[in-house]
Amino acid sequence: MAEDNGPMLLGGNVSASVADAIMSQAQALQVEYESMTGYKKLVDALLKKLDGSDADEKKLADGTLPAGTLGTGFAEADTLFKAYSTVHSELQKLSQGLASQIEALGIAVLTAGKGYAGVDEDTQARMRAIIRQSKQDYVRDRDPQVREDEQARQKAAAQQGTPTPTPSKSGGSY
């Protein structure tokens, strides 16, 4: 005797396709997580290399060179030291930001199948803190996507242009 399993099979196929989509997303997040982790290791290695070198900010700030060795009124030396401090500070901020983003991605990977509601309150609070910090650290002027979007808007506006009115040649009057 034949059984009619049509609706059951359809339901099973839908569930399987949803599960496949969730697994695919989780795998994509895992790849992104691994990429960011590798990038952060590179940034941390740069910081460690700078911190351990003769160019270490503390060594420079402590004055490994006696005052006046480079001469007095040598603005370039001050500018170089300020540039180094800026680079070092920005690398530290980058490392901290990457650490937060990697943590957020890790949480996303672990909770991919549960949904946000299935995550405990401590994890939700941590995610909100990461988002809040990311928003505080965001510098719109440094965002290349913002520049690209603005250039695209300007290009579209230039292509559309404003039509120039032309006088009527019909000879009619109002």
Image (cartoon, rainbow, N blue to C red):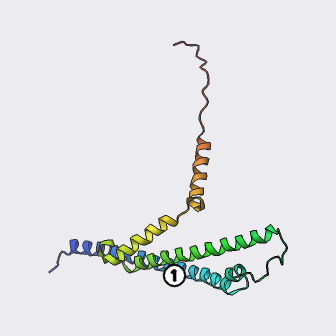
In this orientation, does residue 20 appear? no
Compared with 166, 173 (above or below) is above
Please tell me in which quadrant of the rendered image residue 17 appears. Answer: bottom left
In this orientation, does residue 54 appear? yes
Compared with 139, 109 (above or below) is below
Q: Position of residue 98 (x, y in %)?
A: 53, 76
User: Secondary structure under badge 1?
Assistant: helix
Q: Residue at x 59, y 35 (%)?
A: 162
Q: Residue at x 49, y 74 (%)?
A: 101
**Left or right of 75 on screen, residue 135:** left
In this orientation, which residue lies closer to the viewer: 116 or 169? 116
Q: Circle 1: is it few (<14), some (14-19), or many (20+) Cα within 10 Å? A: some
Q: Position of residue 18 (x, y in %)?
A: 33, 73
Q: Position of residue 20 (x, y in %)?
A: 37, 76
Q: Position of residue 110 (x, y in %)?
A: 38, 81
Residue type of the residue flagged with mark 1: Glu
Residue at the far left: name it. Answer: 1
In this orientation, which residue lies closer to the viewer: 7 or 44? 44
**Left or right of 89 on screen, residue 32:** left
Please name the residue that numbered disc 1 is placed on.
34
